[in-house]
Image (tube, rainbow, N blue to C red):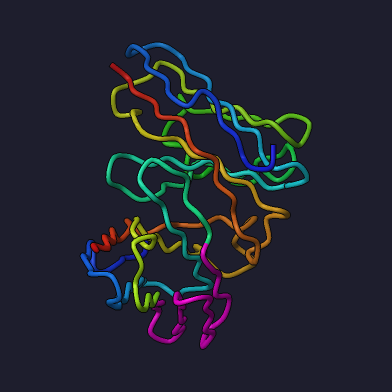
Amino acid sequence: GAGVSQSPSNKVTEKGKDVELRCDPISGHTALYWYRQSLGQGLEFLIYFQGNSAPDKSGLPSDRFSAERTGGSVSTLTIQRTQQEDSAVYLCASSFSGSRANEQFFGPGTRLTVL
Amino acid sequence: QQPVQSPQAVILREGEDAVINCSSSKALYSVHWYRQKHGEAPVFLMILLKGGEQKGHDKISASFNEKKQQSSLYLTASQLSYSGTYFCGTEPGPLIYNQGGKLIFGQGTELSVKP
């Protein structure tokens, strides 16, 4: 596809379960970002990938959160032992090279609800 | 540190103008502006990379005052399509410390344009 895609679009899970969120960036984009958006809030940075490496993981809220990227393309954000405070929309974005001058293209997000 | 946006919300009639401000207590190194419509992904508007820079397209423009640590987004002769939440994103530090275009976003300004 032409844009960033994410799956699933919605995920409802029970507290304590693990979830995996997927992001397919725009082809050829080397930089990939994960953000979290809680209801009525701004975008909270989680992690940044350049290729398959994650030079900046400073936004991950706890060790229950992890992410990987393979083949310089698809990325998966995993949340273990989900808590109710993890409920949010998780947005993925990609940019051409990660330069500060590059715009970030956002996917539609995954809405996570933890019951 | 998260930039502060003002106002938090604004209601306009079609054709009216609005200004959205983005301020930081720390130095601003660049400012990115995005618009997000309800339930959709944020969409890029523009980037300002250096102090004194001004950009615009159509009836939406922005300025970047490095000394005041502030950026302003100007919407003139507003249209119904301008409705949405506007976010500014800033780099967290000087280029040598900023890995890969990571952005810290403000809490957003909700703009509603009424007929």
* In the rendered image, the vertical position of residue A12 relative to residue B50, given as above or below: above
Measuring from the top left, give residue A72's x and y in whole percent: 76, 37
Closer to the camera, B61 or B91?
A: B61
Seen at 63% across and 64% down, the residue is A100
Counting every numbered tag in the picture gives 0
Displayed quadrant of residue B102: bottom right
Q: In which quadrant of the rendered image does the N terminus of chain A lie?
A: top right
Magenta portion: prevailing SS class: strand
Displayed quadrant of residue A92: top right
The reply to whether residue B1 is visible in this rendering is no
Closer to the camera, B60 or A65?
A: B60
Q: Is residue A89 left or right of residue A29?
A: left
Closer to the camera, B1 or A106?
A: A106
The region drawn magenta spans B45-72
Seen at 38% across and 77% down, the residue is B74
Q: In which quadrant of the rendered image does the C terminus of chain A lie?
A: top left
